[in-house]
Amino acid sequence: MKLLEDKILSEGEVFPGNILKVSGFLNHKVDAVFTVEMAKEAVRLFKDEKIDKILTIETSGIPFAFATAVELGVPMVFAKKHKSSNISDDVYVSSIYSFTHSTQYDVVVSKDYISKGEKILIMDDFLANGKAILGLIDIISQAEAVPVGACCAIEKGFQGGGDLLRKKGIKVESLAVIDSMDDTSITFRK
Ligand code: 5GP
């Protein structure tokens, strides 16, 4: 999505450890009007799929997922990050390795909010190594629901998570795919 690429180039900052900061429109301050434009693009990319529900992960996936849910007229569920080891059995739980914090954490979704056979679109702000998406796929399979694919705003293609998921047969669409980045330049996949 050209508009997103332009926004990354003008507002993004690259930090050590391959972290792209886009807090001015995606991760802290949210450009609501632009988020709706991203949502419309997500809907276009998944127009051939039947989608019953969107699943994302708190916190930064929520605005993009919410806007897309409004466009599609479907509910949106966000997996909650869970620190305590005391997890009740009325939730699905998956353990995810955090790329940004270098720690393992659990995410939980109430068993009430995903039903067997539902077609679920996974969404997130960033796709790096693919661990967050794999965790959400794990939750969807525990619920015996169906992952129709994953849609991320920004994929850091050089970290390989997106291509790994594609090789597993998962439909992955990202609005901008970064091939390489450093503190002087960012190059997008064409
Ligand atoms: P993955 O699980 O694919 O390795 O990483 C994706 C998750 O890590 C996303 O949910 C996102 O919150 C976070 N993340 C990964 N890379 C970046 C980055 O460069 N910038 C920001 N702001 N978040 C990132």
Image (cartoon, rainbow, N blue to C red):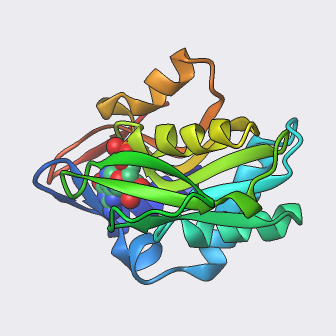
Frontmost residue, 64 versus 37: 64
Instruction: Give percent across and percent down for residue 21.
Output: 29, 65
- Left or right of 51, for residue 151: left
- Left or right of 23, for residue 38: right
**Quadrant location of residue 3?**
bottom right
Frontmost residue, 114 versus 187: 114
- Left or right of 50, for residue 111: left
- Report the residue that reaches farthest toward the left: 16
Relative height, residue 184 to residue 141 (above, below):
below
Q: Evaluate whether residue 50 shows in this view.
A: yes
Kindly identify the residue that appears in the image at 13 percent across and 49 percent down: 17
Instruction: Give percent across and percent down for residue 117.
Output: 85, 39
Q: Evaluate whether residue 174 shows in this view.
A: no
Kindly identify the residue that appears in the image at 54 percent across and 80 percent down: 31
Instruction: Give percent across and percent down for residue 42.
Output: 71, 51
- Left or right of 146, for residue 9: left
Count of marks, rendered view: 0
Kindly identify the residue that appears in the image at 52 percent across and 15 percent down: 167
Frontmost residue, 175 versus 159: 159
Relative height, residue 145 to residue 20 (above, below):
above
Kindly identify the residue that appears in the image at 68 percent across and 65 percent down: 77
Instruction: Give percent across and percent down for residue 4.
Output: 52, 58
**Quadrant location of residue 86?**
bottom left
Relative height, residue 33 to residue 75 (above, below):
below
